[in-house]
Amino acid sequence: MNTLLSIETRNAVLHTMATLLDKERAAIVSINKKDLEAYKGDDISMFDRLKADDKKVDEMIAAAKHLASQGDPVGVERFSFKHDNGMQVYNKTASFGTILIIYESRPDVTVEAAGIAFKSGNKILLKGGKESLNSNLKIVELWHQALKQHNASTDWVEYLQFNRTETQAFLEKPTQKVDLIVPRGGERLIAFVKEHATCPVIISGRGNNFVYVEKEADLDIAIDVIINGKSKISACNAVDKVLIDENLQDKEAFINKLISKLNTTKIQVLGDATIAKNHNLEQISSNEVWYEEFLDYKIVVGEIASNSDAIAMINKYAGGHSSAIITKEIEVAKVFMENVDTAVVYHNASTRFTDGGQLGLGGELAISTDKLHQRGPIGLQHLVTNKWYVHGNGQVRS
């Protein structure tokens, strides 16, 4: 077991990591180009996430610096109690121990998610996808350089070069202690990890996010929020479904404008039976489509009778990630936000803000659709468990 690194050492490693990422920027971009050229799959969202260009390297550097500037999440007092017998009791945050992050395609996870787990005092095991192997190995090499520079063991960040069979074997019978697993990727990866893991798993769930345009919506806001929600199709916070209130004023003109704007951005618009018929769109093949996360240039527009029907529809079909209501009515928004069962709910704002950096956490390990132990973006302060410290001078219980 690795002894907890001091906060000074953890911060110094992160600062050095930021410096090395900048210094090795050209090498990272060049190696990543080889990964991009070698990718032969047809998953456009995976290809998009695989990219580590100059802008992405800037984001990695910013993430490392920001993490270094934040307070220590370990050892924070959450509760204290003085027992009648004189014992002093404290509950403080504690690191998990070892965290395994299994992810697809995104080399930036090798910095950002690993950085959050490292700053939280954990040993990191990384298992990236084969499509980003070269980029990941280069970044892990920088982690090791940064650790060595501050006399810390390179064991703190370890890359597992496992194929699917080896990964399954490791999940079922780990050859070292693993306290928590975080899968970052599509539904198949998450299902695979859940099926085989023998320790707790934080589910960084699917998107399939809904926007409900309520009858008292500001139509300009509605258009902006929906278009922005579809601006990055590979993101788990992208919008896939739009529900339009059947009593919306100027409904047909609004839908025509929305379809036209979406088509301009190359988004294919599908409709439910009503919308497809009235607006000459392709109709969804079945209600099962409402369950789908697209990660693609398509969106479904449907008609709904009321706020309560929209809530019921979202709670049935959405992925538990993000949802939005567009309305001028505060009370209507309040009912929607209190009753929709998603990790993040929005009133008159884009679902694209579901992101640790955007919601004030500085970054995120994952966006959890679980309800235990943390929901939504998991930031530095959430990636801890807790421990009880009890100080006595010989007390025994009678």
Image (spheres, grey):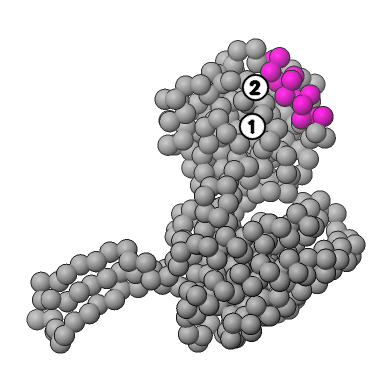
Residue 225 marker = 1
From where the camera sits, is residue 29 visible? yes
The magenta region covers 252-264
At mark 2, the secondary structure is: helix
From this view, report whether residue 270 is shown above or below residue 62.
above
Residue toward you, 98 or 199: 98
- Circle 2 residue: 220
Mark 2 or mark 1, which has the lower sequence index? 2
- Rendered residue at 85%/54% (across/down): 42
Q: Does the magenta stretch include residue 262?
A: yes
Residue type indicated by callout 2: Asp
Nearer to me, 197 or 363? 363
* The C terminus: image quadrant: bottom left
Q: Is residue 248 above or below residue 103?
A: above
Q: State the residue at coordinates (80%, 72%).
A: 134
Q: In this view, does 42 lie above or below 143?
A: above
- Quadrant position of residue 310: top right
